[in-house]
Image (cartoon, rainbow, N blue to C red):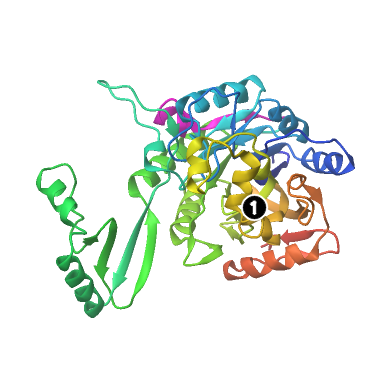
Amino acid sequence: MTRPVTFAATGDSFITRLPYKDEAFAEVAALLHQADVRIANLETTVHDQKGYPSAQSGGTWAMSPPSVLQAMKEYGFNMIGWANNHTLDYLYGGLEATQQHLSDYGFVHAGAGKNLAEAGAPRYLECKNARIALIAATSTFHPWWAAGEQRRDSIGRPGINPMRYVMTHELTEEKLSQLKAIADSIDINAFSKVLIEEGFMNAPGRDLYLFGTSLFREGKENRTRTEPHPRDLRRIIGTIEEARRMSDYVIISIHAHEMKGERKEAPAEFLEIFARACIDAGAHAVVGHGPHLLRGIEIYQNRPIFYSLGDFIFQTETVTSQPADFYEQYGLSHDHNVADALEAMSANYTRGLCVHREVWESVVPIWKMQDGELLEIELHPIELGFGMPIHRMGWPKLSGSSAVIENLKAWSEPYGTQIEWDGRIGRIRMKRG
């Protein structure tokens, strides 16, 4: 038997400023340093105005000084995924600069690159007892952010490692007839029909009906289904199978905002299918993030799936600049500044993510594996300063909050996961035999 390997993972790190290294910082860093493998999702670009602002962003345009990576280093992170909905906020210049700074600071990082092969490649960490592979992808991004594949006759395109999904709405025969009648009475499908006729767009497929950009089919009930895009799923599974032969453990980082209906705490159907397929292909853990709150934990084939670990560092309200597009969204002019724009977006901090306590509470899981098998998981509650002045919120602090664990227990119950509370941390014990 090999010696156990200990893992720690965190949710989104939208870090825009440098920390004051107080007791809270030291305690969180000490917790992370208990693990051999320490994983973060970096949800900002890191550079000094090295790229042009994109016409579309992940929400705010995320840019942070390169020095924030020193704080990530001091927290203890050694593996970083950076495929998410902010990776191309500053186009290819921002991507290339972020990539360079991550390498300069010595991080093993995955999820974006100069072409699809580079963005989707596994990256490896050498530990004392094991070699670890990290594969990072995102399902939440603007379509043109996806990295392009290299060919004999064309170079690839910089971007993120995409995990696209297909959304299909099913309607009863009566409802679908009504939808078709509406489409026939207006021009919602006119342009698509011309594109299909001229060969610039594929027909939706057998038994599928296009309404604008949405796909419909007849079903026994009215519902919406999502499933992983087969090409992306097949490609990522192939990468997992490669990484299995090159390492002892394979970890998947997936950034996914998508949800079931309006239930933000529940992952979309395609994400569950994707995560289980990754485990079936040989991955040892799936680490999710994106919706800025916790989601349930599933133990599948004795391996953990964290559907979302929420936020670890969240400092969107201290970005120092935004392009004109951001101001224009809120009817502001060149006479206004960043504070004005952020207040307009949040209606003076009375709406948005800043007013929801669950956004500012999460857990840091520490789990141990030996010979590929999960031994135990500890769940350490953290809080990020909800209720403090907005410009001081966003740093993690160990909280020992039973309420966080109670919420996580409720969201994990559909997966059959049992979480115990020992008065300080949550625990998931593996059933033996």
Q: Toward the viewer: 151 or 198? A: 198
Rate crowding at label 1 as few (under 14), some (14 to 19) or many (20 or more) other CA atoms within 10 Å: many
Q: Residue at the right extreme?
A: 23
- Identify the residue shown where x is 23% and y is 71%: 179
Q: Which residues are magenta?
A: 112-128
| Above or below: residue 92 compared with residue 162 | above
* Foreground of the two, 237 or 84: 84
In which quadrant of the rendered view does residue 36 lie? top right
Q: In this figure, which residue is indicated by the disc labeled 1?
A: 309
* 178 relative to 417 in the view: left or right: left
Quadrant for the N terminus, please: top right
Quadrant for the C terminus, please: bottom right
Residue 95 x, y percent position in the rendering: 51, 28
Instruction: Out of 76 and 389, give the one closest to the viewer.
Output: 389
Q: List x then y, in percent, for residue 324.
A: 50, 36
Q: Is residue 416 above or below residue 22?
A: below
Residue 75 in the image: state x and y as whole percent. Answer: 77, 35
Residue 83 coordinates in the image, percent (x, y) = 52, 38
- Please identify the residue farthest to the bottom as the structure is shown: 174
The reply to whether residue 371 is in sight is no
311 inside magenta stretch:
no
Q: Is residue 3 left or right of residue 415?
A: right
Asked whether residue 113 is drawn in magenta, I would say: yes
Which residue is found at the position 70% from the left and 46% from the top? Answer: 312
Q: Is residue 151 left or right of residue 361?
A: left
Measuring 63% from the left and 44% from the top, which residue is drawn there?
Answer: 340
Helix, strand or loop at label 1? It is: loop
Give the image quarter of residue 150: top left
Q: Amino acid at mark 1?
A: Leu
Between 430 and 27, which is closer to the camera in this rendering?
27
